[in-house]
């Protein structure tokens, strides 16, 4: 699942500063940013919080006694760092999910209908944003760019 966020405000603010940084340093910085965002999102998914620190919609009550209870995405939160991939280049850093349950994650990310059993029963899920740019992610990006600009070896002459 690839989820793209075009944050124009953040882009405008930092693009002029990044022109002075060497491409190799930008690539390293993009990797660090992606890894830090992946770790941050994994922790927030475990707490059932979206990027803006809003709680996920709770589970619906089930008649079945064996149905899962409590927090959402328990299995995902245990394996989140493994299931989340990072891609980086000198121009971008991307964090996304991989694995066999991507369709479930996409349904929750966007909110929508999904088939839940072999009989074709469809259930409507509320939106639960697993990925996105929030306040914490903006701080991570700004911190890493500030570090790169403070490091004189990463600047072009």
Image (cartoon, rainbow, N blue to C red):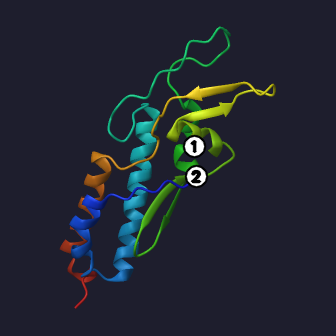
Helix, strand, or loop for circle 2? loop
Q: Which residue is mark 2?
A: 1
Q: How many marks?
A: 2
Instruction: Name the spot of residue 137 as percent of width and height, x first.
Output: 32, 51
| Residue 71 vertical placement versus 75 (above, below) | above
Instruction: Name the spot of residue 3 as percent of width and height, x first.
Output: 49, 53
Q: What number is the disc on residue 106?
A: 1
Distance from disc 1 to disc 2, alpha carbons, whole Å, reads 7 Å
Q: Residue at x 26, y 72 (%)?
A: 15
Q: Residue at x 47, y 41 (%)?
A: 130
Mark sitting earlier along the chain (1/2): 2
Snapshot quadrant of residue 22: bottom left
Helix, strand, or loop for circle 1? helix
Is residue 118 rendered to the left or right of residue 92?
right
Q: What number is the disc on residue 52?
A: none
Is residue 58 rendered to the left or right of residue 75?
left
Instruction: Name the spot of residue 157 as percent of width and height, x first.
Output: 22, 91
Is residue 150 rendered to the left or right of residue 65?
left
Q: Residue at x 50, y 24 (%)?
A: 71
Closer to the camera, 66 or 82? 66
């Amino acid at each position: 699942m690839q989820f793209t966020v075009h944050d124009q405000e953040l882009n405008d603010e930092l693009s002029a500063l990044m022109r002075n940084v060497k491409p190799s340093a930008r690539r390293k910085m993009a990797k660090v940013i992606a890894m830090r965002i992946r770790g941050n999102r994994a922790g927030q998914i475990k707490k059932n919080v979206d990027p803006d620190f809003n709680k996920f919609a709770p589970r619906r009550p089930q008649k079945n006694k064996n149905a899962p209870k409590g927090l959402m995405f328990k299995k995902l939160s245990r394996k989140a760092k493994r299931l989340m991939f990072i891609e980086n280049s000198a121009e971008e850093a991307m964090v996304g999910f991989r694995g066999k349950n991507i369709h479930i994650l996409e349904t929750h990310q966007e909110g929508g209908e999904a088939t839940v059993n072999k009989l074709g029963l469809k259930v409507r899920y509320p939106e639960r944003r697993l990925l996105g740019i929030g306040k914490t992610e903006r701080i991570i990006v700004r911190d890493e760019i500030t570090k790169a600009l403070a490091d004189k070896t990463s600047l072009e002459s």
